[in-house]
Amino acid sequence: MKRARFIYNPTSGREQIRKNLAYVLERLEKAGYETSAHATTGEGCAKRAARKAGENGYDLVIAAGGDGTIFEVVNGLADLDKRPMLGLIPAGTTNDFARALHIPRDIEKACDVLCGDHLEPIDIGKVDDRYFINIAAAGSLTELTYEVPSKLKTAVGQFAYYLKGLEKLPQVTPKRVRIEYDGKLFEDEIMMFLVANTNSVGGFEKLAPNASLKDGMFDFIIVKKISFPEFIQIGSLALRGEHINHPKVMYVHANRIKVQVEGDMQLNLDGEHGGALPAEFVNMYQHFQMLTPSDRKSKY
Ligand SMILES: Nc1ncnc2c1ncn2[C@@H]1O[C@H](COP(=O)(O)OP(=O)(O)OP(=O)(O)O)[C@@H](O)[C@H]1O
């Protein structure tokens, strides 16, 4: 019999998973999985639970929560030689990864996907010895994601990030970097850079408009040194995916990217602290098999 491990964050988003736990488990049992559930208790818990499930030979590991929970589950499993299939129930504030994969937010519909048999290979990013699913970013503006309190996220969702972004804008300063990407070199002062695995980042669906989750490549975006009005201009272009044509924005595809910086620049991995630069980013081609909707038109 197939075995599924359901790893959920009872506090993520608006606490929907906890209320629907019995329903989800019943659906998985009916689909033929012998299922067990694990509620996370805090930082690192989803990672440890996923690792254990992988080592114990589970066929399917499901992450239920926000991007932070999926991030941990992927980090728990990515080093294993034999990796289980991945499933996902989006229940966080932003759910970028689920949106990129068109996995519905509605729990019943998300269960339809889990109980189906449509598997897709997906890439993940690796930076030194850690992994990311959506994005690695650095530069003053990216640091705002740490500063949005959890309570505020639950109450007002994505809007909380935008409020914080506006508040931080005047403090953003450029940094000089040396970047090697797929045999090419870039040296200049920059405001920030993004190494994106999915097209949907921070709730902006068109931030990395051409990102594919299974081509083995990152969408790599650099925002060069710019003025405050240019920042506002690029921000509003980003809502329509048109920022990539701005003269102060560099946009390329790359599989391997090495970044060195003068002074201190902190890395953000999928919205969490990722330590200080320098760092090397590698795209891990089709590293997981993921249960996704067979109908790509299905609504997130
Ligand atoms: N029982 C718990 N109580 C408090 N925090 C928890 C618990 N379980 C996990 N966490 C923390 O929740 C964070 C992950 O949150 P998650 O991404 O699932 O939801 P979210 O913050 O609502 O969504 P998003 O990441 O999309 O903003 C991790 O930092 C983890 O340490």
Image (cartoon, helix red, strand yellow):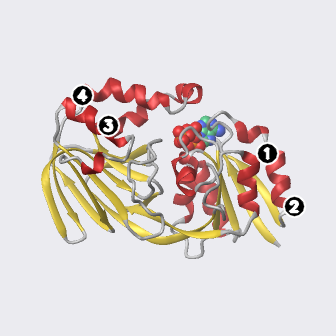
Badge 2 amino acid: Lys
Q: In the image, which is nearer the foreground, mark 2 or mark 3?
A: 3
Residue under label 2, please give it.
30
Q: Position of residue 125 (x, y in %)?
A: 42, 62
Label 2: few (<14), some or many (≥20) within 10 Å? few
Question: Separation of disc 2 and disc 3 at Cα?
Answer: 46 Å
In this rendering, the answer to whether 254 lies above or below 63 is: below
Query: Which residue is located at x 38 percent, y 48 percent?
Result: 207
94 horizontally vs 236: left or right: right
In this rendering, the answer to whether 48 lies above or below 80 is: above
161 horizontally vs 169: left or right: right
The residue closer to the viewer here, 248 or 107, is: 248
Quadrant containing the N terminus in the rendered view = bottom right
Q: In the image, which is nearer the foreground, mark 3 or mark 4?
A: 3
Choose the circle earlier in sequence order: 1 or 2.
1
Question: Separation of disc 4 and disc 2 at Cα?
Answer: 54 Å
Query: Which residue is located at x 53 percent, y 25 percent?
Result: 152
The residue closer to the viewer here, 201 or 36, is: 201
Residue under label 1, please give it.
21
